[in-house]
Image (cartoon, rainbow, N blue to C red):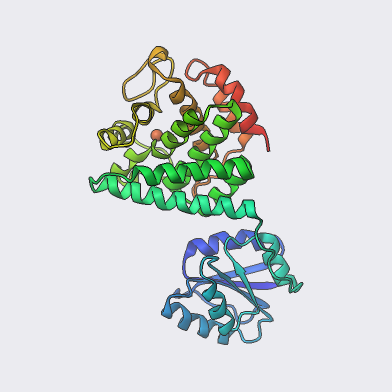
Amino acid sequence: MLVHIVADHQNKISDLRPLLSSQHVITSALLYGNGRLPKDCDAIVAAADLRNAENIAALKTVSTAFKSARRKIFVVDQKARLDAAQAYALGATHVLFNPVYQESLLAALGGSGKPQEPAGDADQVAREAASEGAACLDSMFRSVSTGQQVDVAGAKRAAAKIADAVGESGFSHWMETVRRHHEGTYQHCLLVTGTAAAFGLSLGLAKADMERLYTAAMFHDVGKAKIPSTVLDKPGRLDDQERALIETHPAAGYDALKGTGGISPEILDAVRHHHEYLDGSGYPDRLGAAAIADLVRVLTISDIFAALIEDRRYKPPMSRAQAFDILTDMRGKLEMPLVTAFKKVALNR
Ligand SMILES: [Fe+2]
Ligand SMILES: [Fe+2]
């Protein structure tokens, strides 16, 4: 089947294309792009913000141009059910809510006509926790970059929700949810918080330690708010100057948070020292093993693992097994009994 994808952003096309390309021939165009449209197609898949009047007008044109397409599948935001009504008004034969699953999309194209299965409760919990976590990180990063105080209570609440979601729907599910819907530094912080929560749960940490751990994870990279995104998100290798700039983020995070009510010394310590290694080769203070707290050791392992399994546009995610192998190769730098204990989290699906 020839399927034409049209969207208001390139990233939506990039998300949808791999879901379809194994079974259909795909063409795609941006809603306002100058790319050549196919003469004909069997189906269109449209993904655009339907609260935007210009998008609606442009989609009307597309819908008319592909009058003969038997299926017109609109992918809309779950949070805005009014969008669904708008999609049907534009000629949609099927409306799918984000996050759209390959199964639902293929079923809609295959003509089963079955409505998308409502997401399970656990799925809903994970998606809500991830959205709230991302919103909280966004506000936290904005506050730090503009020199304002961060909302500590909000961050603690969001981190607790993430820990609940991981406890309820499992670490694998959390990881997939975050990688599917979030990008860059926020994706990383959400993954680290979920990894730390899963690790803490599997270690059987007491409630107060769990709270300290997942809150520290939420805050750990906030100093990156001071680093230009051109350096933070640079694909490929960093030069020496860029690396030195990146390495300022633990101290920058510490400086931004110190003196803020509600942030304990243990959390400040974790923010400043999550890149320290037991052999003294880390940064910023080149601490040795004796000066690195247990909480920090757990966070560092979670941080490295999460960074390795991230899904960035310029690099495919590493498998969990490969990422775990890298941790085991860091003998001398990480606490090996903790790495061994982490195996359950890293490899258990
Ligand atoms: Fe970091
Ligand atoms: Fe990190």
Classify residue 256 by image quadrant.
top left
Classify residue 201 by image quadrant.
top right
Relative to 248, residue 76 above or below: below
Q: Is residue 310 visible?
A: no
Residue at point 40%, 18% (across, down): 292
Report the front residue among 28 and 348: 348
Q: Quadrant of ligand 1?
A: top left
Instruction: List x then y, in percent, for residue 105.
Output: 67, 66
Instruction: List x then y, in percent, for residue 194.
Output: 53, 40
Q: Is residue 105 visible?
A: yes
Report the front residue among 128 and 70: 128
Instruction: List x then y, in percent, for residue 241.
Output: 29, 34
Relative to 77, residue 212 above or below: above
Q: Residue furthest front?
A: 207
Report the front residue among 112 and 68: 112
Residue at point 47%, 30% (across, down): 208
Instruction: State the quadrant of the N terminus.
Output: bottom right
Q: Residue furthest top?
A: 290
Instruction: List x then y, in percent, for residue 164.
Output: 55, 43
Report the front residue among 125 and 193: 125
In this rendering, position of residue 150 left or right of residue 2: left
In this rendering, position of residue 208 left or right of residue 28: left
Residue at point 39%, 28% (across, down): 270
Instruction: State the quadrant of the C terminus.
Output: top right
Residue at point 61%, 62% (across, down): 100
Total count of labels: 0
Relative to 11, residue 33 above or below: below
Q: Residue furthest right?
A: 112
